[in-house]
Each structure stands twice: as structure tokens, then as C-alpha cells.
Amino acid sequence: MRAVVVEGFGVLPSVREVAVPRVAAGGVLVRVEATGLCRSDWHGWQGHDSDIVLPHVPGHELAGTIAAVGEGVTGWEIGERVTTPFICACGTCEQCRAGNHQVCPDQLQPGFNYWGSFAEYVALPFAEVNLIRLPDGLSFDTAAGLGCRFATSFRAIRQVGRVQADENVVIFGCGGVGLSAVMIAAALGARVVAVDTNPEALALARAYGATDTVQAGTDVVAAIKDLTNGGADVTMDALGANSVVQQALLSLRPRGRHLQVGLLPSGVQLDVSRLIGQELEWLGSHGMAAHAYPEMLDLVADGTLRPAELITRTITLDEVPAALDALTAGTPAGVTVIHP
Ligand SMILES: NC(=O)c1ccc[n+]([C@@H]2O[C@H](COP(=O)([O-])OP(=O)(O)OC[C@H]3O[C@@H](n4cnc5c(N)ncnc54)[C@H](O)[C@@H]3O)[C@@H](O)[C@H]2O)c1
Ligand SMILES: [Zn+2]
Ligand SMILES: [Zn+2]
């Protein structure tokens, strides 16, 4: 099969023939029909993830068709249209038994722990725990985003952030995660302020439901305090940057909640006195468990959430090395989907 192969961290990958992955017991092989380009793929390529062993095939936000079913898997057949959370949980550990699959200590992530979906085929482990059947009306392109960024934002805004109607929510970074969060928070009735460096991304944020936008580089904190009548109830770092974290914490009103979704490979220093004195909540959020998907899929089916609108570009495997490289300088507005 053809795949995007990373031979060195930060070195432009090549697109070449590799062996089709083996189907393990309990897993399935999926013919990848669509796979999203997430900034986490860029982090992995840059060497920010210690799980990655070279040579490596990135890609973790995917949808496709089951091409082979491993030993012991029941309930799934060749030809079924599926997606999966990028966190493939084991299903049997203490956390999984409690329903917390997104923090399973035995999780496997395609494109991180093993070869991912920037390829014609990807192997998925623990199939009975993680596979999600795609409704007929849901395209592969749209479903790919449900494997990582749209679902991650759904859990962050809805379950971890507990966003309520009429709350002021500020989203820092309007790429795949941030635009999803704007759409989801707006659908819950929140008043959403979107922040980005890219005016085109801000225009998309307005189209997806942001009430106001703030151009990064200006006095962001002052602008947010002004727009939120003194401070946000909820902020989200949907980029992963120290400057954004600091702005977000300064933008919160007392007892506000901060959602950390963007990765911070170099860590960050927090003003803990402020967290204490203002009773701010610092909340990490990681993907979403497969069992939590039906609520999101119902909202997609009835048109409340419209993830299809986030896709602005489709590319081929051959275009992936340049697209990954371009993420070093910035992000094109909207979501990029790859057709292997
Ligand atoms: N926690 C999780 O489970 C999870 C899941 C998916 C992605 N992530 C992480 O979330 C982050 C976002 O991923 P993505 O694919 O949406 O990224 P992206 O590159 O698509 O989007 C980032 C956005 O931030 C904007 N930006 C740049 N500088 C800015 C600044 N100073 N202020 C405000 N905005 C700025 C960019 O213009 C872009 O629109 C990454 O760190 C990714 O690794 C985490
Ligand atoms: Zn991702
Ligand atoms: Zn587990």
C-alpha cells in the first residue's frame, strides 16, 4: 500500500510503498477513505511525542471501510463504514470499566503508538470497544473529523467544560479544534468570542456561530473583558501556546473554567496564586470515548451540529509532506482532509 513515511523528526516525509498492516486478534483492518490533518500530526512529526518510533506513518483522524476482521471480533463485518476515537481504549481496565476510555492507561493511538492513517490501510485494535458505525447520511470526509478534533471539542465543551446557554465562552485558535468548539458552544446557546491571528479563520468562526471575534496581536485580554462584561466564564486553548494560556487565564472572570486542549510540549508556567485567589478551574480534556458518540451523532443528524461545513480543502497522500511542512508557519483556514 502507499503511505506517508516519516524517517526523521522534522525531516520532510516521503510517500512510498509499505506492507499492509497485519490484523491483530481483536482488531480490524480499515481501508482509509478520508483522514484529517490535525496539528497533533505536526507535533508527532516534530518529535514532541515520545511514543513515536521511526520509521513512522502518522494519521489518527480517520474514517473508512472495514477490509478485514481479526480473530475473536464479533458484530463487525467487512464492508461496514466506520470511524474510531483516536484513543483506542482497551475496554477492560479499571478506567474503561468506569467509562473513562479517553484516559485508558492501555490505550493505543494510530499515528502515535503505531502506524496511522496517512496510508491506504490502517489497523485498529480493540475493535468491539472503539468502532463507531457511520450513519448512511454521514460522508467519510465529515466522519474523519469525528475521530479526533470535532469529538475532542464536543467532550471539552459539553462534558469537561460544562458550558451552559448564555455563558461567555472564548476560543483561542480557530483551526480544526477551535472552529469545532465555536460551532458546538454556539449550538449550546453560549455567547462565543473567537480569537485567531488569521482573519480568514475568524470569518469562518463567525459563520459557525461566533458572536464576536478578536484579532490576535491586539490587546486580546482587554477586548475580551469588554466583550464579556468583565470576563469569560470559559476559555479554551485550541492552539497550544504559552502566550494563549496566559491570555486565557487573564480573560476569565472569578470562578471561570479554562479548557486545555492544545498540546504544550514544553510545558507552561501558571500563576497559581491567581488560580487559588479567583478559584479558577484548569481542565485538561483528551479526545472522547466511543460510548459518548451517540449524543454527538444525533446532533449531527438533526443539523444542530454541521461538521461538514468545517472542511475547506481535500488533498492526496502526495500532498501531505508539503501540507505538514506548511503547518510550521501557520494553518490554512478550515479543516484539511486527505484522500489516500
Ligand atoms: N487534547 C486533545 O485531545 C487534542 C485533540 C486534537 C488536537 N489537539 C491539539 O489541539 C491543538 C489545535 O489543533 P488543530 O488541529 O485545531 O490546530 P490548527 O493548526 O488547525 O489551529 C490552530 C489555530 O490557531 C491559530 N493561531 C496561531 N497563533 C495564534 C495566537 N497567538 N492566538 C490565537 N490563535 C492563534 C492559527 O491561525 C490556527 O487557526 C494542537 O495543539 C493539537 O495538537 C489536542
Ligand atoms: Zn488530532
Ligand atoms: Zn482501558
Image (cartoon, rainbow, N blue to C red):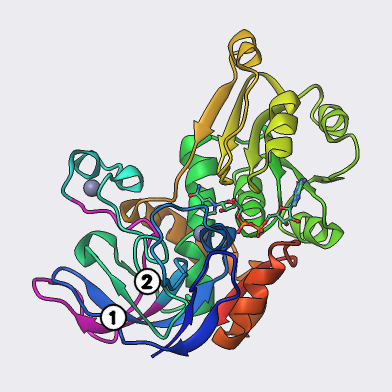
Vertically, is 248 above or below 172?
A: above
Vertically, is 129 above or below 160?
A: below
Residue 35 seen in the figure: yes
Q: Is residue 82 magenta?
A: yes
Q: Is residue 309 left or right of residue 230?
A: left
Q: Could you say which disc has been placed on residue 115 in the image?
A: 2
Could you classify mark 1 by the number of other residues whose Cα lies within 10 Å: few (under 14), some (14-19), or many (20 or more)?
some
Quadrant in the picture for residue 167: top right
Vertically, is 44 above or below 162?
A: below
The magenta segment: 64-91
N-terminal-most mark, 2 or 1: 1
| Viewer-side residue, 80 vs 314 | 314
SS class, disc 2: loop
SS class, disc 1: loop
Q: Is residue 297 magenta?
A: no
Residue 305 seen in the figure: no
Q: Which image quadrant: the N terminus?
A: bottom left
Count how many numbered circles sit on residues in the image.
2
Residue extending farthest left: 72
Please state the horizontal and vertical placement of residue 299, each as a whole percent of the image. Answer: 50, 58
Asked if marks 2 and 1 touch (Cβ < 8 Å), the reply is: yes
Residue extending farthest top: 277
Quadrant in the picture for residue 247: top right
Q: Residue at x 66, y 47 (%)?
A: 186
Q: Which residue is mark 1?
A: 21
Please name the amino acid that badge 2 sits on.
Trp
